[in-house]
Image (cartoon, grey):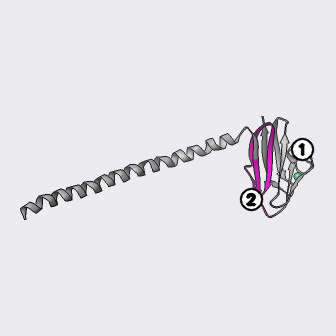
Amino acid sequence: MRNLIIPVVILIAIVGGYFLLRGTSQNKTSTPTVTNEPATTSATPSANASDNNQSETTIKYTSAGFSPENVTIKSGGKITWVNDSSEEVQIGANPHPIHTGNKEVSGGDFTLNLAPGESKSVTITKTGSFGYHNHRNSSQGGTINVK
Ligand SMILES: [Cu+2]
């Protein structure tokens, strides 16, 4: 019997040690997961920043409004308007209702009309800050900054 006790104690030590190591390795893997969360959050504004001042960007319209409302593009850059709502959207340059601002935002027309699911691209060359809105619901709108 005594000859058996020593191997059993060794076995318990090995098994116990294995679970101890597993426990610490689990703690180690869970620690970077926690630090990854703020890293992902801080990566979001930089991803938004990279959306800015580029030559092409997309603005989506939904029933909630435009997203992103405000964009920055380079002069000569392209804006693609996408209607992701179930109603027609009529994009017009500010101010409503006369649209005397930069009509490049609406492709040179009084309004750029998009049926549900439709998308159209416009090119903007004038530099400055240009407001736009949904002519059918002028409380929805945003700003296009052209640099
Ligand atoms: Cu209008």
Of helix, strand and loop, which mostly describes the magenta segment? strand
The residue carrying mark 1 is: 103
Looking at the image, residue 33 sits to the left or right of residue 113; the answer is left
User: In the rendered image, which quarter contains the C terminus?
Assistant: top right
The label on residue 114 is none
Boundaries of the magenta span: 58-86
- Residue 114 place in picture, x, y as percent: 85, 57
Looking at the image, residue 74 sits to the left or right of residue 13; the answer is right
Question: Which amino acid type is marked by label 2?
Answer: Ala
Front residue of this view, candidates 17 and 106: 17
The residue carrying mark 2 is: 64
Q: In this view, does 91 lie above or below 100?
A: below
Residue at image position (71%, 40%) is 52
Quick one: label 2, few (<14), some, or many (20+) residues within 10 Å?
few
Q: Is residue 99 above or below residue 125?
A: below
- Residue 26 place in picture, x, y as percent: 37, 53
Q: In this view, does 19 lie above or below 108?
A: below
Q: Which of marks 1 and 2 is nearer the N terminus?
A: 2
Front residue of this view, candidates 58 and 140: 58
Q: Quadrant of residue 78?
A: top right
- Residue 7 place in picture, x, y as percent: 14, 59
- Residue 70 place in picture, x, y as percent: 74, 45
User: In the rendered image, which quarter contains the N terminus?
Assistant: bottom left
Label 1 vs label 2: CA separation?
23 Å
Helix, strand or loop at disc 2?
Answer: loop
